[in-house]
Image (cartoon, grey):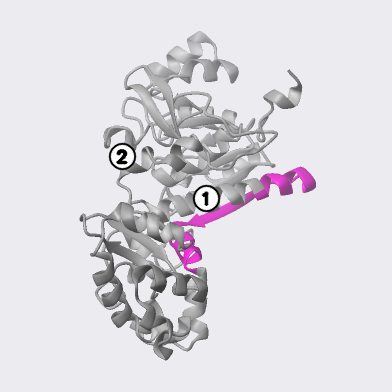
């Protein structure tokens, strides 16, 4: 076996994770999957908030990490963190702006210990701006950025909640991208840097195409802006749902043929995507009626047969067992001492030479505290003193 056979893209990179919420967890898991060593810092005895949430919440975003407990309100624990950061390449924090200063874990303090440190702050609305100190949750960020205004029927009210934590995950993706770019810059120029990631900003980034389209077209009315005829979710005769994506003219023609709507193919009102948008409600009503005439599997066969982009609306169970998921081995299983067999969704990028891997289960609370402290030079006596003081 050659060196490249066992190499990972981020081998040799040490990441310190002092986050307590989903965005930071997911960001550092991305880095861990790619080979970074990630040391996850949690509060002694209680851990971070996701440990007390729904079963699997913590375990879904913390694989491939080592667990260290530190009470960062304690000066002794702050010294441990600073020793650790002196050896690290990256630190990711997810507190509200201003909190890290009180914990001795702010950028100015830690960059003095490690000048090449890449320091990433993940917060709701960023380190400056009128919403800096506001609390927030995923739907709030999506609402601010206009994402929720696009949810639901274009001619009806917006839907108030998106089940997946879209803003959290988007913030994590942009944080990981920014960290990787900063590590590259550090390798070339020998300097670290500070990264300010706001979940609200990430939500705006998801709106890039729609926001630009809206502003360029001079603020058209909402219905015209949001109407996407030929794209949507429709109920079928067996009370199941499918999605279609037939915005382009050739897909539109194929859709009309499949549904037996030949008059629509020669109707000037529906000749182009632009003109179809002006008649979105009529099209939506017609498609809704048509799709109720057959069960889901029949429609999938018909639409796939003429090349219309379509897919079933899977439940989570159906998604896990979908032929695509099975063929691509998207759901993988590892052993966990408490949960037993623990499912994980693999890293979606398939790197040919330095693949991302699921190597270790999520850590138990403080599982690696003693071994990490010994690496940092603490003796058994010193570790005992930290424990007696409640610092770890």
Q: Earlier in the sequence, mark 1 or mark 2?
A: 1
Look at mark 2 in the image and give the residue it sits on: 317
Look at mark 1 in the image and give the residue it sits on: 173
Q: Residue at x 52, y 50 (%)?
A: 173
Observer-nearest of 3 and 18:
3
User: Of tags 1 and 2, which is closer to the observer?
Assistant: 2
Q: Start and end of the magenta stretch?
A: 181-207
**Residue 349 placement (x, y as % from top left):** 58, 42
**Dot 1: what SS?**
helix
**Residue 387 placement (x, y as % from top left):** 40, 17
Q: Residue at x 35, y 76 (%)?
A: 261
The answer to whether residue 134 shows anywhere in this view is no
Observer-nearest of 79 and 189:
189
**Residue 302 placement (x, y as % from top left):** 39, 59
Q: Is residue 222 above or below residue 168?
A: below
* Dominant SS type (magenta): helix
Query: Label 2 crowding class (10 Å Cα cut-off): few <14, some 14-19, many 20+?
Result: few
The answer to whether residue 49 is left or right of residue 5 is left
Observer-nearest of 88 and 178:
178
Mark 1 and mark 2: Cα distance apart in space? 25 Å
**Residue 292 placement (x, y as % from top left):** 23, 64
Q: Residue at x 33, y 33 (%)?
A: 56
């Amino acid at each position: 076996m050659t060196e490249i056979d066992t190499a990972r893209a981020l081998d040799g990179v040490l990441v310190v994770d002092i986050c307590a919420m989903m965005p930071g967890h997911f960001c550092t898991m991305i880095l861990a999957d790619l080979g970074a060593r990630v040391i996850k810092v949690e509060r002694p005895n209680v851990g971070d908030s996701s440990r007390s949430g729904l079963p699997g919440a913590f375990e879904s975003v913390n694989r491939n990490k080592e667990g260290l407990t530190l009470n960062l309100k304690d000066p002794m624990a702050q010294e441990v963190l600073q020793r650790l950061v002196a050896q690290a390449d990256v630190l990711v924090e997810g507190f509200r702006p201003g909190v890290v200063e009180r914990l001795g874990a702010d950028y100015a303090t830690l960059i003095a210990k490690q000048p090449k440190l890449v320091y990433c702050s993940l917060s709701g609305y960023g380190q400056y701006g009128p919403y800096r100190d506001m609390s927030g949750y995923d739907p709030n960020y999506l609402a601010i950025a206009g994402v929720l205004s696009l949810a639901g029927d274009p001619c009806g009210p917006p839907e108030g909640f998106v089940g997946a934590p879209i803003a959290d995950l988007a913030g994590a993706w942009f944080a990981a991208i920014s960290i990787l770019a900063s590590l590259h810059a550090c390798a070339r120029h020998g300097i670290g840097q500070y990264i300010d990631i706001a979940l609200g900003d990430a939500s705006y980034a998801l709106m890039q195409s729609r926001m630009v389209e809206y502003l360029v077209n001079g603020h058209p009315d909402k219905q015209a802006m949001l109407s996407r005829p030929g794209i949507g979710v429709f109920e079928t005769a067996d009370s199941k749902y499918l999605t279609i994506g037939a915005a382009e003219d050739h897909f539109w023609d194929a859709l009309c043929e499949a549904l037996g709507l030949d008059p629509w193919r020669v109707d000037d009102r529906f000749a182009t995507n632009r003109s179809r948008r002006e008649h979105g409600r009529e099209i939506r009503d017609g498609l809704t009626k048509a799709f109720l005439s057959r069960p889901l599997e029949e429609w999938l066969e018909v639409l796939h047969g003429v090349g219309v982009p379509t897919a079933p609306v899977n439940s989570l169970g159906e998604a896990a067992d979908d032929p695509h998921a099975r063929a691509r081995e998207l759901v993988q299983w590892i052993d966990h001492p408490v949960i037993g067999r623990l499912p994980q969704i693999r890293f979606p990028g398939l790197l040919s030479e330095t693949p991302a891997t699921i190597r270790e289960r999520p850590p138990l609370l403080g599982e690696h505290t003693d071994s990490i402290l010994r690496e940092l030079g603490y003796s058994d006596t010193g570790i005992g003193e930290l424990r007696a003081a409640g610092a770890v």
